[in-house]
C-alpha cells in the first residue's frame, strides 16, 4: 500500500486492510503440519516426539532393550522380522526432533496435502521396508557365508530416514523443468553429506548410504510416475464421442 493511499484511508477514518498480512500468516500456517490437512504427518511427528521424550527420561535399561528389539539389524530380521520392521521407524537416533519437523514439513506434508494420508503412508512405509530389506538381506547372507563377523548382525538400525527419502524422491519427480534437476541434485547432495558426516569407512555407514540411495530412487523412479498418473486422472472424453444420455 502506498503512502498516499494510506493517508487517504486515515483521513476517511476507515480501517487499513490487513489482507496481505492475513495471507502471509495463512501461507506460513499452511506449511506447518497440522491434524486437519496433514493428519499422517502431524500424527507421526507426535509419535516421534513421544518416543524421543521416552528415550530422554525413561530408564536407560528399558529404552536400551526397546531399541534392541526395534532395530532392523540382521539378527532381528531373522528372529522377529515384522516387529522390527514396524517399530524401527518410530525412533529417532538422536534428539533432533525439531529438525525432523522441518524435514517432514518439506518432504512429507506436501505429498500428503496433494495425495492424502493413506497414499502418503503407503509411499513412506513401502520405502522404509524395501530399503531395509535391500540393505540388510545381503548382510545376512554375508554373515551366513562367514564373510562378515557375527557382530555385524547386531548393530543398531532405527530411524525414519528411509521413509523420508522415499517421499522426497517422489516429490522430486513431480517437479518440472530445472526445478526438478535442482531438487534432485540437492537430494543426492544431502545423501552424500549424511554419509560423509558419519564414519564413511564403517560398514554400517556404507549400508545406510545404500539404504538412503535405494529409498530415494525408489520414490523417484517407482512412486513418482505413479503419483503423477494418479494426479492427472482419466483423460476427458471428447464431446463427439460421449455416449448419449438415457431418456428412460
Image: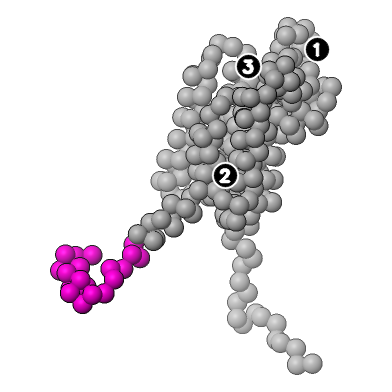
Residue at point 59% right, 18% down? Answer: 205
Q: Is residue 48 above or below residue 157?
A: below
Q: Which callout, 2 or 1, points to the residue nearer the camera?
A: 2
Residue at point 23% right, 65% down? Answer: 1
Q: Position of residue 57 (x, y in %)?
A: 63, 24
Mark closer to the chain start, 2 or 1: 2
Does the magenta run of residues contain 239?
Answer: no
CA gap, disc 2 and disc 3: 26 Å
Residue at the disc numbered 1: 144
Residue at point 67% right, 45% down? Answer: 121
Does the magenta run of residues contain 16?
Answer: yes
CA gap, disc 1 and disc 3: 17 Å
With 132 as the anchor, is 35 left or right in this view? left
Q: Residue furthest front?
A: 13
From the image, which quarter does the C terminus lie in?
Answer: bottom right
Q: Is residue 203 above or below residue 241?
A: above
Residue at the disc numbered 3: 204
**Viewer-nearest residue: 139 or 27:** 27
Mark closer to the chain start, 1 or 3: 1
Question: Within 10 angstroms of label 3, few (less than 14), some, or many (20 or more) residues?
Answer: some
Say if residue 131 shows up in the picture: no
Magenta range is 1-20
**Viewer-nearest residue: 225 or 152:** 152
Q: Secondary structure at mark 1?
A: helix
Callouts 2 and 3 close, C-beta under 8 Å = no
Q: Secondary structure at mark 3?
A: helix
Q: Position of residue 21 (x, y in %)?
A: 35, 59
Residue at the disc numbered 2: 108
Q: Secondary structure at mark 2?
A: loop
Q: Position of residue 241 (x, y in %)?
A: 65, 79
Please identify the quarter of the rendering in which residue 83 is found: top right
Amino acid at each position: 500500500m502506498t503512502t498516499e493511499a494510506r493517508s487517504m484511508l486515515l483521513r476517511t477514518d476507515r480501517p487499513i486492510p490487513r489482507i496481505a498480512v492475513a495471507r502471509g500468516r495463512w501461507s506460513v500456517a499452511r506449511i506447518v503440519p497440522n491434524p486437519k490437512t496433514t493428519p499422517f504427518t502431524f500424527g507421526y511427528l507426535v509419535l516421534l516426539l513421544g518416543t524421543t521424550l521416552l528415550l530422554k527420561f525413561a530408564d536407560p535399561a528399558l529404552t536400551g532393550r526397546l531399541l534392541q528389539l526395534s532395530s532392523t539389524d540382521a539378527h532381528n530380521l531373522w528372529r522377529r522380522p515384522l516387529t522390527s520392521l514396524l517399530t524401527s521407524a518410530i525412533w529417532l537416533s538422536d534428539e533432533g526432533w525439531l529438525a525432523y519437523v522441518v524435514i517432514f514439513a518439506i518432504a512429507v506434508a506436501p505429498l500428503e496435502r496433494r495425495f492424502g494420508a493413506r497414499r502418503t503412508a503407503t509411499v513412506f512405509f513401502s520405502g522404509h521396508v524395501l530399503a531395509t530389506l535391500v540393505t540388510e538381506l545381503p548382510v545376512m547372507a554375508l554373515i551366513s557365508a562367514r564373510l562378515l563377523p557375527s557382530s555385524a548382525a547386531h548393530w543398531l538400525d532405527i530411524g525414519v530416514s528411509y521413509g523420508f527419502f522415499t517421499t522426497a524422491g517422489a516429490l522430486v519427480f513431480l517437479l518440472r523443468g530445472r526445478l526438478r534437476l535442482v531438487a534432485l541434485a540437492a537430494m543426492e547432495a544431502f545423501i552424500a553429506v549424511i554419509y560423509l558426516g558419519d564414519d564413511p569407512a564403517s560398514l554400517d555407514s556404507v549400508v545406510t548410504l545404500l539404504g538412503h540411495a535405494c529409498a530415494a530412487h525408489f520414490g523417484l523412479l517407482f512412486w513418482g510416475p505413479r503419483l503423477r498418473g494418479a494426479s492427472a486422472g482419466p483423460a476427458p472424453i471428447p464431446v463427439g464421442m460421449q455416449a448419449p444420455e438415457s431418456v428412460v
